[in-house]
Image: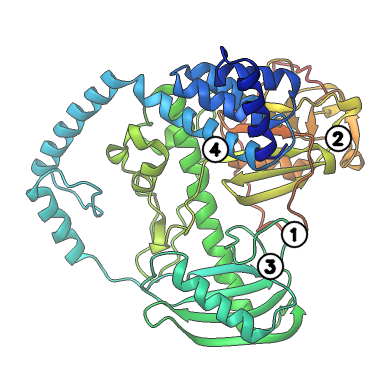
Amino acid sequence: MKKAEFLQLKITFLLTYPEQNDLAFYRSFVRQYPNDPIGWLYLGKEWEKDGKDDLALKAYRQALHGEESEYSLEAREAYQRMLRQRKPAKRTSTAQRSSALLLLLCALSLLFPRPLGEPAKPAADSVSSLAATAAKSAVPVQAPQHVEVISVPGRASADTLRKQLQHYLQTRRPALSQPFTILLVPEITGVEPFTPLLFYAPTQVKAVLRFDPRTNAFIAQKWFPQNCNCEQDTQVKQAKQALSLEQQTLQNVLILRSALYHHYQRNGNLPQQLHNLAQAYPANALPTIPAAVQPTAGPKADSWTYQPDTFEAAHAWPSLQQVLPLPGGYPEPAVPLQPLQIVVHQANFSLSLVSGQQVVRRYPIALGKDRLTPDGYFTILQKVSQPRGPNNVYGTRGLVFSSAGHAIHGTNNPPAIGKAVSLGCIRLRNADVEELYSFVSPGTEVIITSQKSPVSNWTNASRQVLPAGKDEETPTITYKWLN
């Protein structure tokens, strides 16, 4: 239903029943139109305004069950915002203890200085002085080769695209300080033109360009007469190699930030060390800690810069940029990364791993027959490597998302992928579920909708699998998931 029609119904209702209020209309509307997200969205807003957060969350969540529209997307954003805001309010005493501990750590750092990166919030002038001294003594390193993949309309001329691209680059973000490479690719269905594609592997290229943000000018460009894979073109080959390295870096930091975020949601604090995320079942957030990729020509980094003392509970996700900065000098994406989510589109048998509006991975899947796979909003509850079942029916990995026995798992029958054959579980090819298992941690949101995925002709970046250990297996348990 369009907003104008919705508001007209509201006016009619209030004129007919003058003793009623907005809340009464919204409740009446969702009873009459339970599948229309606009009613649930406004009901959620009304509950939130009245301070009834639990009811607001339920309403926003219900909006996700209806037809996908601008209202369901707005409800999803409101739902996620409330989830992120409600944890810190319950942990005032924890925050106070953390502040006292932070002061103690700052005092100790003055007595026992160590090499520091640039602190997000210097505790005192002396700490700033230490950081400045460390910065002056650091070995200068070569800036990384930043590459952006941007999809553009297919029928526009090179001159038109060049002008549109230059305008976009001038306005889309604060200017970078170093020249970078741009790979223009044909428009992707479901993706807005001139959108950076952080995790897309280009198969066809329209142009490769170098842009200097200091002068707002292209310093090199090469256009191809038709879309081509250009695998033998030296400039394209170099750009793709640099892109692959940057994507690996972004993926690793996204994996870790998401795991840290979910750890905070569950426990109210961050782990003391990153390796605490890679423990034995059932505390296995990640199989192992991914490597810190070092793309520069400077000293090789063998570990992450992890600064949990810079965490801000009131801004949990954004502050993780300071807690775990991108290594190697890469810029943060223009549109900030978001916690990883799994979105299942039943209509075209696809599962997407997303970060906000960015597709990270897309996989074909098998679903429940007779619509036994439930629509709705879930979270990953536990992860199991090599889940036991009759005839290895669950494949090599399992991610449980429902206490009713629903899981995302592998398969011993790859030809069934793309079909509705299970009792409700979601099946992937084993290689795909092993990669998905590497990316997500318990607490990851799972959204299952009957709609089609808006994105098509997508190509995943290079496969990235973190090896699972024996301590993530449960050899004494035989699972009875709804396969």
Residue 417 percent coordinates (x, y): 87, 41
Residue 193 percent coordinates (x, y): 64, 65
Q: Which residue is mark 1?
A: 189
Q: What distance separates the C-alpha of mark 2 from that of mark 1?
A: 32 Å
Question: Marks 4 and 1: in contact by CB < 8 Å?
Answer: no
Few, some or many residues within 10 Å of mark 1 (<14, 14–19, 20+): few
- Please give the name of the residue rendered at 63% of the width and 38% of the height, measured from the top-left corner: 71
Q: What distance separates the C-alpha of mark 1 from that of mark 3?
A: 14 Å
The three-letter code of the residue at mark 2 reads Asn
Is residue 374 depicted above or below 431 in this figure?
Answer: above
Q: What distance separates the C-alpha of mark 4 from that of mark 2?
A: 37 Å
Is residue 466 depicted above or below 81 in this figure?
Answer: below
The three-letter code of the residue at mark 1 reads Thr
Q: Which residue is mark 3?
A: 202
Secondary element at tag 4: helix
The three-letter code of the residue at mark 4 reads Glu
Secondary element at tag 2: loop
Q: Could you tell whether 406 is left or right of 269 in the image?
A: right
Q: Which residue is mark 2?
A: 412
Q: What distance separates the C-alpha of mark 3 from that of mark 2?
A: 31 Å
